[in-house]
């Protein structure tokens, strides 16, 4: 049963462009981590002002190992600006267990 860890971050409007830019230049180490299954950065459009950093892992231990690793630290070292501290006051880590999931099947017609 996979585990989902979501970092929900409120980013002040004047820092959003920089926040997204930082993710475009992210380390790219997480996807090479054992037990890593999925990552998405979700920008809020309606109903919330929180960005979500969605990650999915094979086990909670896989997530914990990454979170305690140098790769996590390197991805969060501040990048020489004040973005991480500014957002740090307003972030929440949410944990979920995947009960059901689905994706498109190879035998279904794909939309163009
Ligand atoms: C104070 C809390 C946090 C802030 C402000 C924050 C912000 C950021 C920023 C700006 C980046 C872009 C990389 C860079 O700037 O060098 C990043 C990378 C990332 N963050 Fe966080 N983050 C926080 C905690 C977390 C937590 C708890 C998770 C767990 C779900 C997480 C998941 C990720 C992932 C998966 C990446 C990409 C790493 C890679 O490419 O290897 N972050 N984060």
Image (tube, grey):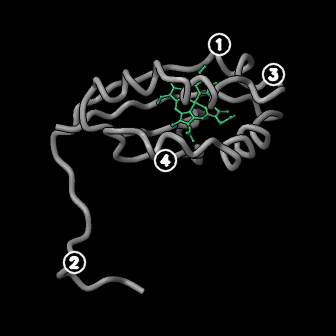
> CB under 8 Å between callouts 1 and 4?
no
Sort mark 4 into few (<14), some (14-19) or many (20+) by Cα contacts within 10 Å.
few
Which residue matches tag 3? Answer: 82
Foreground mark, 1 or 4, reads 4
Residue 19 horizontal side relative to residue 93, left or right: right
CA separation in Å, label 1 and label 3: 12 Å
| Position of residue 11 measured from the top left corner of the image (x, y, whole percent) | 69, 29
The residue most toward the top is: 89
On the rendered image, what quadrant is the N terminus found in?
Answer: top left
Sort mark 2 into few (<14), some (14-19) or many (20+) by Cα contacts within 10 Å.
few
**Vertical arrangement, residue 42 with respect to residue 80, above or below:** below
The quadrant where residue 35 appears: top left
CA separation in Å, label 2 and label 3: 45 Å
| Position of residue 16 measured from the top left corner of the image (x, y, whole percent) | 75, 38
Which residue matches tag 2? Answer: 106
> CB under 8 Å between callouts 1 and 2?
no
Foreground mark, 1 or 2, reads 2
Residue nearer the viewer, 31 or 42: 31
Q: Earlier in the sequence, mark 1 or mark 2?
A: 1
On the rendered image, what quadrant is the C terminus found in?
Answer: bottom left
Q: Residue at x 83, y 34 (%)?
A: 14
**Disc on res. 40:** 4
Foreground mark, 1 or 3, reads 3
Q: Residue at x 58, y 43 (%)?
A: 44
Q: Residue at x 55, y 24 (%)?
A: 70
Q: Earlier in the sequence, mark 1 or mark 4?
A: 4
**Disc on res. 89:** 1
Instruction: Report helix, strand or loop for mark 3.
Output: loop
Q: Earlier in the sequence, mark 2 or mark 4?
A: 4
CA separation in Å, label 2 and label 4: 23 Å
Q: How many marks?
A: 4
């Amino acid at each position: 049963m996979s585990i989902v860890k979501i970092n929900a971050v409120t980013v002040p409007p004047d820092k959003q462009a920089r926040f997204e830019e930082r993710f475009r230049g992210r380390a790219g180490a997480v996807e090479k981590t054992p037990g890593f299954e999925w990552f998405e950065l979700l920008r809020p459009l309606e109903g919330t002002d929180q960005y979500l950093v969605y990650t999915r892992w094979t086990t909670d231990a896989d997530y914990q190992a990454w979170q305690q690793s140098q790769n996590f630290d390197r991805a969060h070292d501040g990048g020489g600006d004040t973005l991480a501290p500014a957002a740090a006051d307003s972030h929440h880590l949410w944990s979920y267990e995947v009960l059901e999931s689905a994706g498109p099947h190879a035998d279904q017609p794909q939309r163009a």
